[in-house]
Image: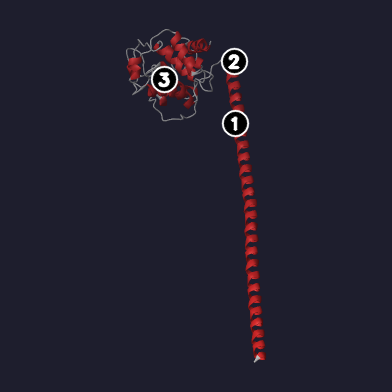
Amino acid sequence: MARQNERKMKLYMEAGLAVLLVLTIALASVSGRLSSQAHEKDKNKQEAAVQGEAEVYEKNKGNDQEKNEVKDQRENNAQNTAGNAEESQETIADGQYPIMGNSRVTVDEMVDYFQTAGKPYPKEALSKGGAESIEVFCRMYYDEAVAEGVRPEVAFVQTMKETGFLQYGGDASVEQFNFAGLGTTGGGVPGNSYPDVRTGIRAQIQHLKAYATADPLNGKCVDDRYEYVKKGTAPYVEWLGQQENPEGLGWATGDNYGYDIVRMIHDMKK
C-alpha cells in the first residue's frame, strides 16, 4: 500500500513538472514574440523618421530652387526694365519723342499738370462717363496707354492740346467723350461720340498706336477710324503733324502740331 502511494506521488510530481515545463516554454515564446514586435515597431518608426526627414529635405530643396528661380527672374526683369528705360532715353535724346515705349511719367504728374493750368475739371459731364475726378481721368489714361504700349504722357498731353485742358469750344463737345478730335474734319463736323470716358480714351490711344507702329492692337478695337490709318507712318510725336511728317501723313494739319505736344510734355516733366 505504501509503495502504491509513493508511485502515485511520483507520477503526480512528474506530471506537475511536465505542466510547469510546458508553461515555461509557452511564456518564453510569447515574450519572444512581444519583444520581436516591439523591435519591429521601433524599426518602422526609425524608417518613417528617416523617410520624413528625406521628404522634408527634398521639399526644402525644391523650395530653395523655386526661390532662386524667382530671384533670377526678378533680376532679369529689372535688367530688362533698366535696359528699356535707357534705350527710350537715348531715343528721346536723339531729338525724337517716340509714341511707343516705357514711361517714367506718373499719374500724379499728369494730375498736377492739369491743375497747374488753372482750368476747372468738367465734373458734371465726365462723371456721367465714369470719370468723376481728374485723378480718375488721369488713371484711365495711364492704364489704357500702358495696355497698348503707348506712352501715357503722349495721349494725355495731346488731349490737353486738343481740348484746351478739357474746356473744348471747338466742333466737338465734352459730352461726346471724344478727347482728341477723332472724326472732326472741320466745318462744324462734331466727329465721333463714345458711350463713356474710358472708351473715348481707348479709341484715341488705339489711333495713336496705328500711327506709331504696324504692331496689332492688344485689345479689342473701338477706334472706328483705325483701319484708315497707314500703319507706322508716325513713330514719333513730332511726326503727328502732317507738315512735319516725312510722308506728309499724320494726325493733324496744323503747323508744328507734334512739336507743340512734345513741348507741353517737357513742361509737364519740369
Residue in the image at 59% along x and 35% along y: 70
Specify whether residue 250 is in view.
no
Which is nearer the N-term, disc 2 or disc 3?
2
Q: Which of 151 and 26 is in front in this view?
A: 26
Which is nearer the N-term, disc 2 or disc 1?
1
Q: Name the spot of residue 10 as percent of width and height, x first.
A: 67, 85
Q: Name the residue under label 3.
A: 136
In this view, the residue farthest toward the top is 118
Label 3 crowd (10 A; few <14 / some 14-19 / many >=20): some
Which is nearer the N-term, disc 3 or disc 1?
1
Q: Is mark 3 on a helix, strand or loop?
A: helix
Count how many numbered circles sit on residues in the image.
Answer: 3
Q: Name the spot of residue 195 as percent of width and height, x first.
A: 33, 24
Q: What amino acid type is highlighted by mark number 1? A: Arg
| Residue 74: numbered disc | 1
Could you tell whether 16 is left or right of 148 in the image? right
Q: Name the spot of residue 149 as percent of width and height, x first.
A: 50, 25
Q: What element carries label 1?
A: helix
Task: Give the answer, above or below, for where 224 lies relative to 24.
Answer: above
Residue in the image at 66% along x and 76% along y: 21
Specify whether residue 48 is in view.
yes
Label 1 crowd (10 A; few <14 / some 14-19 / many >=20): few
Q: Mark 2 points at which residue?
A: 93
Viewer-side label of 2, 3 = 3
Q: What amino acid type is highlighted by mark number 3? A: Val
Q: Do the residues labelled 2 and 3 touch (CB within 8 Å)?
A: no
Q: What amino acid type is highlighted by mark number 2? A: Ala
Q: Nearer the viewer, residue 248 or 2?
A: 2
For the residues labelled 2 and 3, the Cα–Cα distance comes to: 31 Å
